[in-house]
Image: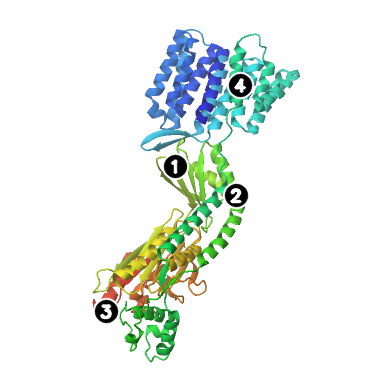
Amino acid sequence: MKNILRFGLHVLFWITSLLFLPKSVSIYVCVFLISVFCLQNPIDMIFPLALCFWFPISETCILLGVVLIHFLLLRWIKKNRFYAFTVFVFGFLTVFLTQLLQKQFQMNLLEPILLLGVVYSCINLLYSYQTFEQKNNTIAYHQNLVYLCILLAYFVLFLRNRLPLSFILFLFMQLYLFKDAKYLILFAIFYAVDLLIESPSSCTDVLAAVAVGFVPPGIFLTFSYSSWEWIFLGIYTIVLTFFPAGNKTISVEADYIDSLFRDFAKYLQQLSAEFRQNNEQKILNNQKINDLSQTYCDHCYRKTLCKAKPDRRYSFIYGAMQGLNQNIYDCPNYHRFYSPTDWEIKSTATEYSGIRALADEINHLYHQSLLLKKEYQKLIRLLEEFGYEVLNIDINLSCETLFFTIDFSKQKIIIESLLLRLAYKSFGEELELKIVPNDKNIRIYFYKKPLLKISYAHTVIAKNENLMSGDNYYIKKDFNSSYIFALSDGMGSGYQAYMESANALKTISLLSSYHFSMKTILHLLEDVCDLKRNYDHYATLDFLYINTANQKMHLYKMGSTTTYILHNHQLKALENRSLPLHLDEVNSSFELDLSSGDYIFLLSDGISDFISKDEFYDLVRSGTESTEALCNKIVQYMEEKEQRKLKDDLSLIAIKAI
């Protein structure tokens, strides 16, 4: 509504002012307005026809013909600048030939014709010609500059035709609509130069013009009040004076902090729901596991994986106590471990690691938002100057590179090149964008230009006697060119193991939508899972976060098996030393640089327990194969080695940086 009112005030000035210019000049200005309005909105071309009552019938027919020509050639006008300018010139030639035939053309008309041609050329350059939804469209880069060009043409015509001071003052009143002092000062300088050349004693008129540009009601001091026309002029002045200010101010800092606490509230709501649903839970006798380990495992003579790796021993005893896994290590004391617990207690925990981590991160992100506040506000200001109405901005400062979302109204079609240029001007970094329109607005995701591409493949196979695998995976590509890969292995096998790993990944999917860092999200996951699960069940987790814009990868291992990295044909093993779904920043957190050609392999113990590092290296050492081919090769090797009888569920995610 505000834009319609602004346009209406401009059009009212442009049309009524023509009544006071010579008719021989006004007819050309009408054609000029028709061509400009055609670029903006073809329906607006009818406004100049309001002056038909003032023109002779012959010139009225000319205007009607020019409008008809523009409507017929509208498709071509919106196709490119050359077609649009050609139709504009054709309209001028129509008027020129008519005046020439009627012997009404005068040489002094060449000056306004040339002026209007130059101004239209400038306006034409201020438009973008692009195809949107299979239609040709013209979109103004900066609508205010278009209006200023029209005002400049009027300004020169007023001065050349020596219209009274009141017309000049009304023109300066139009500058009040732009709410920008620099445009007013620029016009004042032009006016002062003209007055100095023509009449140095009239420089006080410049001060009057500037005053009216800042305070439109000042024009009431110039009214003679001897005729009734001043009433209409006064009404116009009052409406213009109370025209609403600029677009709604978007508070970057407040909106960002609001989004943080909205996510915090969602997390607490989920935590409370899980607490209510699982108020009484089974407790795992950790002391008994330690006693069993000291009594039987520390003195065991077998050189199996559970002997060498404490985390594998922990998970093995865990399952043996509940009878949920097989004796895959051929343990001689396996039957002594079975001891299901049915003790129940009420959870009285009031402090969780996730809440502590969350408090620290909110404090960090708040101060980080203050550092970037000026850049975001500059971007919003530039967008509004170019005619885009910003409805909302959503900033994700927890991302390691620039990543934010802006909701625009649909009043103006998006010009991608313009938005990217404004983003670079604000942040000094090359960004990319993705447009996601919906029924109410247009949402645009801005993110740092990626330096790498990622390809990946995955496979999950249940062991022979099971129809369902206890392993699950989760893969997510975000709009900021970052990737999340998660691989979870539920305790035991079959449906129960499947549900344990699936629940962990489902929670990961929910928490990854929050505005927090991946490390904080994993702390939140610990809290949720502690409340959500029975303590005699668990799931392991490999959580990999890749940012292709800064070529960094973050790997978090929570009770999971070995992860392999192939870099420069060298295989590196990242071992886990933490308990299942327990984040230990020292023993289970890895941060590495990622280069083109690197491979990452997330495995379940169904592979790592039965293939040595040397065997795995022999399978992937070439470093040239696709991720799909490597997945197939590893699975085929496993099946051949185990003679088609897998002892455990098998899952694999192969990732390659390109």
Q: Residue furthest right?
A: 201
x and y, in percent, of residue 388 in the image: 51, 38
Please give the residue where the numbered disc 4 appears in the rendered image.
237
In-front residue for pair 129/169: 169
Query: What distance separates the C-alpha of mark 1 from that of mark 2?
Result: 23 Å
Query: What distance separates the C-alpha of mark 3 from that of mark 2?
Result: 59 Å
| Placement of 171 over or under 653, stated as above or below | above
- The amino acid pointed to by label 4 is Thr
Answer yes or no: is residue 390 visible. yes
Please give the residue where the numbered disc 2 appears in the rendered image.
373
Helix, strand or loop status at disc 1 = strand
Mark 4 or 2, nearer chain start: 4
Where is the C terminus found, in terms of image quarters?
A: bottom left
The total number of labels drawn is 4
Please give the residue where the numbered disc 1 appears in the rendered image.
442
- The amino acid pointed to by label 3 is Glu
- The amino acid pointed to by label 2 is Lys
Mark 1 or 2, nearer chain start: 2
x and y, in percent, of residue 474 in the image: 37, 62
Q: Residues within 10 Å of mark 2 (few under 14, many from 20)?
A: some
x and y, in percent, of residue 67 in the image: 42, 19
**619 left or right of 240 in image:** left
Please identify, in this view, whether the residue under mark 4 or under mark 3 is nearer the observer.
4
Helix, strand or loop status at disc 4 = helix
Please give the residue where the numbered disc 3 appears in the rendered image.
642
Mark 1 or 3, nearer chain start: 1
Helix, strand or loop status at disc 3 = loop
